[in-house]
Image (spheres, rainbow, N blue to C red):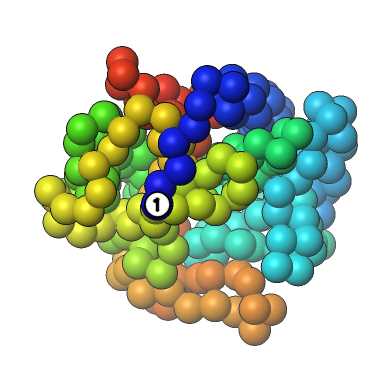
Amino acid sequence: MIPIKNEKDLEMLKAAGKILAKIMQRLQECICVGISTGEIDELSEDLVRRENVISAFKGYRGFPANICTSINEEIVHGIPGERRLKSGDIISLDLGINYEGYFSDAAITVAVGRVNSKIKKLIKVTKSALSEGIKQARANNYLSNISYAIGSYVERHRFSVVRQFVGHGIGCSLHEEPEIPNFGRAGQGPILMPGMVLAIEPMVNMGKWESEILDNGWTAVTKDGMPSAHFEHTIAITEDGPQILTA
Ligand code: MG
C-alpha cells in the first residue's frame, strides 16, 4: 500500500522540504577545493541543529554520519572523512531530515573547481533526468512512467542508470512504498494519486550501469571506476500536478 497523506501531513512535509532545501543550498555554497568531507558533515550537523531538525541518516542502519558525501566514481552512501576535494572532482551530497516525525530527502551533485565538459554533461543530464521523472509524477499516471522517463532520457544521452538503488515513497518514515526504479517500461505498476509523496532520485553513470559496494559496507561505486552523479527531490502528487517540496 502506498500511503496517502492528509492535509496536515502534507503541510508538515512541505515544511520538512523547505527546511531541507535551505540546508542543501547552504551546503552547495560551501563546496570548494580543499574542504574535507568530514568538514561538510560537521557543517551539516550544525545546519540541521540550527533548524531544529534531525538528520534522518545518522544511525540509520548504523550509518555513521549526518550526510552522504560521494566523490567521483562513488555513486551513493559515501561516508564523510579526511578526504579533501580537488579541482576536477564531483561530489554528490545526499541528506534526509526528520522534522517532528516528517521526512524529506534530497541530493545534488556539485562540480569542484574546474571539471571537464563530459563531467559537466553528466551533471546536467542527471539533473534533467530528475526533471523528466518529476513531470510524470501526476495523478492518474502510472508509477513506471516516472521510471521510463528517467531511464530513456539518460540512455538517449549515452549514459547509464544505476540499477541497484531506487527512489522511494517518503513521509512518516524515510523509506515507504513504492520503490521507484530509474529504468523500466512505461505503463506499469500502481496508478499515482493525489497525496502520494515520493523521493525521486536518478543515479547516472558516465560508463556502464554496474555498481558494487566497498568493504565499509556502505559506499556504492561504479564497477568501471567512471564518475556517477545523483539528484533527488521529494515531491508531492497533487490535483494540480507535481509539487517539489525540496526546491
Ligand atoms: Mg532517497
Residue at the spot 25% in from the left edge and 49% down from the top edge:
190
Residue at the spot 84% in from the left edge and 42% down from the top edge:
45
Classify 10 Å Cα crowding around label 1: few (below 14), some (14-19), many (20 and above). Answer: few
In the rendered view, tell whether residue 129 sits above or below residue 148: above
In the rendered view, tell whether residue 65 sits above or below residue 197: below
Q: Locate residue 111, reporting x and y percent.
A: 54, 42
Q: Is residue 56 left or right of residue 196?
A: right
Residue at the spot 81% in from the left edge and 54% down from the top edge:
38
**Is residue 120 something one can see in this rendering?**
no
Please name the residue that numbered disc 1 is placed on: 1
189 or 127, which is in the foreground?
A: 189
Residue at the extreme bottom of the image, as rendered: 215
Q: Is residue 124 left or right of residue 170?
A: left
Q: Locate residue 101, reporting x and y percent.
A: 71, 39
Q: Is residue 166 left or right of residue 83?
A: left
53 or 231, which is in the foreground?
A: 53
Q: Residue 126 is drawn in which quadrant?
A: top left
**Is residue 138 something one can see in this rendering?**
yes
Q: Does the residue labelled 1 lie within 8 Å of ligand 1?
A: no
